[in-house]
Image (cartoon, rainbow, N blue to C red):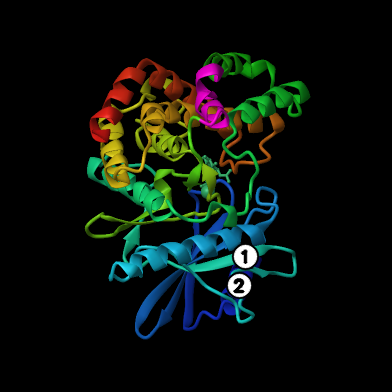
Amino acid sequence: MNQEEEQILEVCKRFGIEGEYRRFEVIESGHINSTYKVYFYRNNKLKDYIVQRINTYVFQDPVAVMENIASVTEYIRAKIKATGVTAKRSVLHYSKTVEGNYYTILPDGGFWRCCRYIDDSVSFTQTDDLRIIEELGKAFGKFQTYLADYPVKNLHIVIPHFHNTILRYQALDEAIKRNAAGRLEEVKDVIAGYKELEELATKPYRLQRQGVLPLRVTHNDTKTSNVLFDAQTHESLSAIDLDTVMPGLVAFDFGDAIRVAASTVDEDEKDLSKVALDLEKYEAFTRGFVGSLGDMLIEDEKKTLSLGALAMTAECGVRFLTDYLDGDKYFRIHYPDQNLARAKCHLTLARDMVKKADIMQAIVDKYCK
Ligand code: GN1
Ligand code: MG
């Protein structure tokens, strides 16, 4: 047993997981935390758990992260139960240690948490199945409606200015000045490309600051892999990865999902001729998302929903580029220039969204009627 496995088992013990330990798998899809799926055998059944070590470079107050998550999941659970149905497969259930905490800290300082995986569920990193994409939209739309009346002041701001697109562009400027990894020369074109998009990409954030767009409780990390689906029917069950639940714009949750779910390619596709916004996928997501929001949106939110997709694609790309210039300190990479590949791919996708802006908004309008 290596050190990683020993730590995982120690964490499981502290969370009181019973049964016979079988094995663990590393889940590779996240860029921040270290995530493991751990299997125990109990009552003639295999039970799976998600055990995670939180990245405390990114989440500097991980206790606050867990307080947000516990509060939001309990709130959603109560809402679902109030409708008379079981919430067992519709919201995550985090485990508590014997001391009653939603986290435990190992001797090396590692900050860990554990939750039961939802039975018979699956997730997808990327899919071409339009029905799944519509279900994805439904899941994030429902997340909005569950939390529409959640007391926002109860939430900790775990990463200040998380979707402040203006500050993300400023952070890029600072990384350019530092040129810490000596990579500036090779990315000049990519920087110029992002600068061209700055005015449009920062518009939703500016509209919020001007009081035109309201802050709501948002998920803030709505990529495809952050929803669980029923393994057989592929109906959506629950939004997961609630680390970044904070006040935000509905256009950001919509847009960040479109960035991933409506793209023709993976986040780091190197053949840029393949990168585009797939309008069929876009429509499927929009149908699911807008369809489950009911009449929640105000007119200005409806009018700027599609712009959120450009904002989130450009912002995420700017963050990848900043990290590349800084020497890959923030996002986990699996090969040396992955952050650059991600940044170029996002720039190409964002430019395609600019071309398709009118069609994108017309599709939103169609489902807002
Ligand atoms: C990170 O943790 P993960 O992989 O779900 C990042 C998101 C980015 C995303 C890009 C806390 O999400 O903001 O959009 O990578 N999360 C944080 O794939 O920075
Ligand atoms: Mg995340």
The answer to whether residue 164 is seen in the rendering is yes
For the point 31% across and 32% down, the residue is 282
Quadrant where the N terminus sits is bottom right
Q: Foreground: 255 or 344?
A: 255
Find residue 125 and report its horizontal and vertical position in percent.
40, 45
Type of residue at label 2?
Val
Tell me whether circle 1 and circle 2 mark residues in contact (CB < 8 Å).
yes
State whether label 2 is within 8 Å of ligand 1: no
Segment colored magenta: 198-211
Disc on the earlier residue, 1 or 2 = 2
| Residue 142, above or below 95 | above
Type of residue at label 1?
Trp
The secondary structure that most of the magenta stretch takes on is helix
Q: Quadrant of residue 76?
A: bottom left
Q: Answer whether residue 209 is magenta in the image.
A: yes
Find residue 308 and report its horizontal and vertical position in percent.
44, 30
- Left or right: where 238 falls relative to 69: left
Q: Residues within 10 Å of mark 1 (few under 14, many from 20)?
A: many
Q: Which residue is mark 1?
A: 112
Q: Quadrant of residue 167?
A: top right
Q: Element under label 2?
A: helix
Picture quarter with ligand 1: top right
The answer to whether residue 220 is seen in the rendering is no
Quadrant where the C terminus sits is top left
Q: Answer whether residue 210 is magenta in the image.
A: yes
Determine which of the numbered discs, if any, sits on residue 11 in the image: 2
Q: Quadrant of residue 240?
A: bottom left
Find residue 71 and report its horizontal and vertical position in percent.
53, 63
Gap between marks 1 and 2, in whole Å? 7 Å
| Residue 88, above or below 288 | below
Q: Element under label 1?
A: strand
For the point 29% across and 21% down, the residue is 359
